[in-house]
Each structure stands twice: as structure tokens, then as C-alpha cells.
Image (spheres, coloured by chain):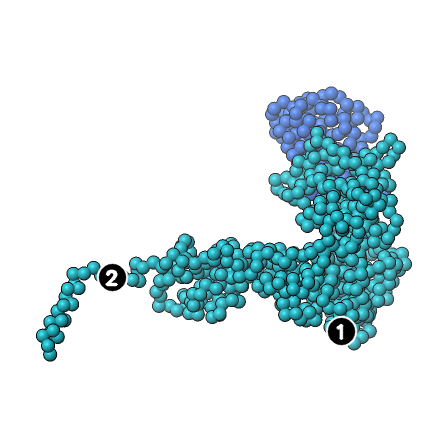
Chain colours: A blue, B cyan
Amino acid sequence: MSEKKPLSEGQAGNRQLLKSKKSLAEILDVAAEFERTARDFYADLVPRVSKQLRYLVEELVAEEQGHYDLVTELRARPDLAQQISTMVETPVSDRRFSDSVHLPRLGDNPDDQAVLQFALGREQKAIDQYSALAETSPPGPIRELFVFLANEETQHKIELEKIYYEIVHSGGV
Amino acid sequence: MSVRDVISPFTAWKNVFRETVSIKDPINSRPGAPRYRGFHQNDMEKCIGCGTCEVICQNAAIDMVPVDGQEARDGDSGLRPRIDYGRCCWCALCVDVCMTGSLTMSNEYQWVDSDPDVFRFIPGAEKKSWDDAELGYRRPDDHHIKPAARVSMGEMEPQVRIGNFDEIVDGYSIEQAVLEADRCVECGLCVATCPTHMAIPDYIRAVREGDYEQGLRLLYDSNPFSQTCGRVCTHKCETACAAAHDGDPIAIRWLKRHITDQVPIEKYTEIIGKPAEPTGRKVAVVGAGPAGLTAAYDLARKGHEVHVFEAQAGPGGMIRYGIPEYRLPYDVIDNEVGVIEAQGVKINYNCRVGTEITMAQLRDDHDAVLLTIGLHLGRSTRIPGSDHPMVMKAVDLLRDITEGKALEVPRTAVVIGGGNVAMDIARSIARLQQQKFGKVGMTVTALEDFDHFLADPEEVKESFEEGIEIIDARGPREIMLEKDGRVSGLKTWKVLSIFDEDGRFSPQYDDGDEWIHFGEMVIEAIGQMSDVSVLGEELTEALEWNRGRIRVDQAGRTSEPWLWSGGDCVNGPDVVHAVADGHRAAASIDAYIMAKQEEA
């Protein structure tokens, strides 16, 4: 399922991430990497969680695959080809987002609450990042692209929050 | 013949020039009086299909019939009255008795047609010219065929009850119960809403007639936990009650309890009757809660040998280890379980499946196995500091209290949660505080605001009465610690909203509205889950799951043909639902093992 190895500390790619400005292409590459590593992380997690929780992790795999497809399709869109080398001011959140390409350990046998909290945290990072990029981008197609991506991540976070409430609060007993 | 006789007919001619006093065209120009009882009108939205009109009609002119577009739902049978004007005597008793006031009579009385069948129609469903008539007969607002208010239940005063764990409510006296039973119109809407479909109007009639043995027989036909449900049932039946449209709903729960109070416990088994002859078949039940023991009761009555395996030292499951004694006394549970045991059910206490015995052993030694393990594990918020030893889970504390363990009672405590479990633990610890320190120091913080509170309103009301502070719309952020590491309280933020405009969970906080709730102990009461470790890895892998819970079919059967499951661990927390699950599973298990017997 993985197409690329995740970036690791000290690689040239990471130094690139710390620049104050990046091209749209670079930003979308990091975003795709963020989604891909998450997808692979959840895919690896599936056999490690108890069977009754697998549905949850499998749903996260599918969701992250959807995000990955979305970002890679956007990267390849002909109407963005002219914009792809445009330099965009990287916001404060960029470092946090880029670092999140490296995934922390979730333990050997995480429960449903831990998986959900982890997933919610990643969604929030993505929302912060895309929202901040939208704010630092001039009005136009690039800003609209980041607003769109932020909305996508927000929708997914809302879905996860709903699941969290149903599972963890178990109907308010 | 006199002259007068000849002339007098001509005197009538004088009337030719007088004003007429009769109506020239009475059929077309004479409206009914303003309160005339003419053809019926029925507000289809207000009508709940309770059929009270049908029952009261002395001429059998009303039939309750299905109507296109009117679906049955809780509190509405989906049926609507059809009136036969060949029988109707226009007495308006149906209007007077209508529980919702939906049925009225227009002042329209003229209708000529050569087809007699048209004079039988469903008001409101079949369009008539008088549907919107404003004049006619309506039940006057102050006319009530039954008293609108329910007979109040006596209970211990707050300042008395806060010092002990004695049962709060008194139960009805016979006189009170008969008065309350008299308010029931026997519509039966409650039967459909009750998960175990208790014969509610019938047992209420038994109260009215003073036939408690018949009442008990009816209760046990559908619910071997009637003493329990008579105290702690979620009583959804009362939300469906037709009387609620014209005052308070009937106190169905209290009347159920009243029947069980009136029959001496030693007579229960005699009234219920003996089980069937032994079939030689064996069933194992894991967990001695309402679902498991209901199934055990049903199966034992059919002659099967039932062995229950219970991890705790006493029976009842969540109702014993999760509900405080002031709501449900332990001796009530013991009495109830004694009746079940008298049918031949064997309960093995302190026998934890997965430790003392495995599921594989149960499968090998029995014809079928039923898993009813409740929701005995508490969820944690996992906010910073929540792993501190003085941050406890409500279910653990409630279990400790039931077991009589010596607790470290805090002078002050904060509960996180707004459901009934939060109220249960707050009120239990408050009692211990009162006993030890002479005062209550308890704060409950709930995510939900009072308009969307999860706990029953009466639980909230009684908690306030007992001196418990309940603060709504607070989101827990962090456990506060003293420098020496002791818990000092809970930090919360104001919850601006929990759900978005589409009703989805999306909590929004005001981080500028931060409070510290002081407490030596913080108790988490946010949710519960099942301890599915009893299954073991192999069975966990073999089973099909449904979003974290064991997948079962409508009869409670899992994907493993020898295993059934039900109760809180499958369908969430509710005693009467657990009882219903137990019945369904027992019927399915019985069918399965009897089919096996026939094959053999």
C-alpha cells in the first residue's frame, strides 16, 4: 500500500520543510505524505488491535486513503499546473504539521479511545495547517484550495467526534 | 248546519296575508345550534389512536382502523376512528372521553345521499365539507372523565434520607393504588412501547379489582424482574400513556411495584407454578443480571437445566453493583432471584469466566451458552491527571459500596458526567459524607446543559434536594493537583454547544470561562463498557462484531451457533430491555436445543 518511505529526520526533505516559503507543489507533497503515512500507520495497526475494534481502524484507513487520493489528484490537476510553482508563505503551524509526518507509537494494543484520540489529534493538526495556509495565501485559487482541504478535514473530525461520543460516553449512562 | 258553519272556512283566508312562522326550505337554510352535536371531526395529528372512543361507544358505532399515512409509533397506534352513522346516536361520549381532544363534532347535520355506505367514514382522513367548521360540540376544558393528576408517591424527606441508604419511596397503599389504577383508560398504547410487552392494562385492572395474585401472574408472564422494574424501570410506557395528554401519565411503574408488595414472597412460586418436566438439556448463562436470569428463568420453566456463572459474590449484575440501595434495596433483588432459583436455576457465584472456567469448557459441557456480562468497566476522560489514584471511576466505586468495602470518603468530591450513573455515585458519596462529616460536599459537572441533560429529571431534582451542586455545560480539561501531589479539584471550560446544527457531537468551548471545582476526589462517570476479556482471544477472533459490540441476530444469537448474547453488553444500559433480551434469547435457545433433540 505504501508508495514512498516516510521522511526521516536529517533527510534533505526535512530541511526543505523548514523554509519560510514553499511552492504549492511542495506543500501538497507534504500533505500527501501526511495522509499516506497515516493510512499506512492505521493499516499496520489493524491486525494489532482486538477484533472488535478493527472496524474503527479500518474506517480510518479508508478515510486516510480518501484524503491521500484527494491531495494527489489536486496535485495533478491541469488547472493547478500553472500555480504549482507559486511560492506560499508557510505559517507557524507548518513545523508542527511537517513533524506529524513522523507518527508516534500508539502502544502495542491500543483501545478504541486511544485510537480515536490519536486520530482526532491528527485531524486537528491538518485543520490548523490548511486553515493557516489559507490565511497566508492571497485570495485566489490557492487560498480556495486550502479552504477546501481544511473543510474536508473538519468534516472528518466532526465524524470522529460523533463516534467518540457514542463509544466513550456510551449513550450517557 | 248553522250559518257559522258555512262561513267559518272562509275566515282562514285572512291568514293568506300574515307573515309565515315556519322555514320555507328547512333542509338548506337552517344551521345547527352553535354547540349542536353533528358529524364528527378528527384532528389526525392530535389523535393518538388510543381507541378510548371505540371502547366507550354504547352503540358500537366506532371502529379503530388503519389509515394510509398514519404509521404506528411509540404513543400512537396508527389507527384512527371510523364512525358508522347508522349506529351513532350523536351522544358525544366519544368526544367527552377523547384523551387528546382531537375528536370533536361539527354543527353540521344535513347530508343526503342514496348510497348508505358513505355514512360510514373516517373523520379527518376522508375530506368532508364540515372538517373546518368552527361551531359544534367540543369537550369543555374543565371536563375530565378521569382525574388529571396522579396519586403522589410518599417518600423520605431529603434531610432524613441523605444520612442513610434506606429506600426513598414508600410504595402505594391499597387505597392510593386503586385511585391511581382508576385513572387508566386501558388503551394499551403502553404495551407496544414496553420492550417486554407487559400486560399493563390487565395488571392495572387487577389492582382495581384487588386481585393481586392475578396481577402477579400477569407480571411474571413477561417479567421475572417485576420488583426491580417496579422501582428502577426507565418506564418508557409512561411516556406513551394516553393519560399524559390530559394530565399526568398513569404511574405504571409504581402500580407494578404495588402488586409485588401486596403478595407475600413465599406465595410467588405457588402462583407462578412449577416448571415443566426435565428435558435433560443443559444451558450455561454467563452473568447473573436481569438478561441472564430472565433467560435462565424461562429456560428452567421449560424443563432445561440452567447453570449461571457469576463473577461477583451476589446476584443482580448491574442492578446490584451499579444501582444504589436507596433506589433498589438488595433484599428486593435477593427475593426476586430467589423466585428464579426456585424454578431450578443454579447460580455459581465468585466464578469468573475466563479465569475459573473458560468459554470453551462451557460450550463443551452445555447445549447452548448465553453471554450477558453487562457494562462493568468505566470509561475515563483521559484528561491530564486522570491517572491519579484519587481519580476514580463511578462503576468501581458503586461496586465497592455494594460490596461494603471501606472507602476513603472525601470531604469534597467532583463528579464528571451528567447521566444517571453520575447522579447515583454523587448521591451515594454524599450519603457517606453526611454520615462521616455531617455535611455534603459534592459537585457534579456535566457536559450537557440542563435542557439536554441525560439523567432522569427526578434524579436531578432529588440530587439538588440532597444538597448536591450540579453545574451544567462544563467540559473537563484537567485534574488539579496540590504541590504535594494530592488532588485539589477539576478545571473545566464552559461548553458553548455540544452538537452542531445537524445534531452531531461537536463540542465548542469558551476557554475564557474557566472554573476550578474543588474536590479531594474526582469521579469519572462518563460511560461504561463490557469486559469482553472473558471471551478469550480465540473466541474474540471467531465472533462477528458490530461496531465494537458482539453482533447478534434478532433472537440474540451470535455468529457462533452455540452462543447467544444480550442485555447491556449488546444493547446498552436498560433493565427492562435486558429482560426483553433474556426472553428472546431463551426462546431461541429453547427452539435450538429442542430441534437438536428431535434430530437425535
Q: Residues within 10 Å of mark 2 (few under 14, many from 20)?
A: few
Circle 1 SS class: helix
The residue that appears at 11% across and 79% down in the rendered structure is B1
Tag 2 subunit: B
Q: Where residue B357 appears, x then y in whole percent?
A: 89, 60
Q: Badges 2 and 1: C-beta atoms under 8 Å apart?
A: no
The residue that appears at 16% across and 63% down in the rendered structure is B16
Observer-nearest of B261 and B107: B261
Q: Earlier in the sequence, mark 2 or mark 1?
A: 2
**Looking at the picture, which amino acid does disc 2 mark?**
Val
B464 relative to B35, above or below = above
The residue that appears at 86% across and 66% down in the rendered structure is B365
**In front: mark 2 or mark 1?**
2
Tag 1 subunit: B
| Residue marked by disc 2 | B21
B309 relative to B432, above or below = below
Q: Where residue A56 appears, x then y in whole percent?
A: 75, 46
Circle 2 SS class: loop
The residue positioned farthest toward the left in the image shown:
B3
Q: Quadrant of the N terminus of chain A?
A: top right
How far separated are the C-alphas under marks 2 and 1? 78 Å
**Looking at the picture, which amino acid does disc 1 mark?**
Glu
Q: Where residue B149 appears, x then y in whole percent?
A: 59, 56
| Residue marked by disc 1 | B270
Observer-nearest of B452 and B458: B458
The residue that appears at 51% across and 66% down in the rendered structure is B56
Q: Is residue B34 left or right of residue A140?
A: left
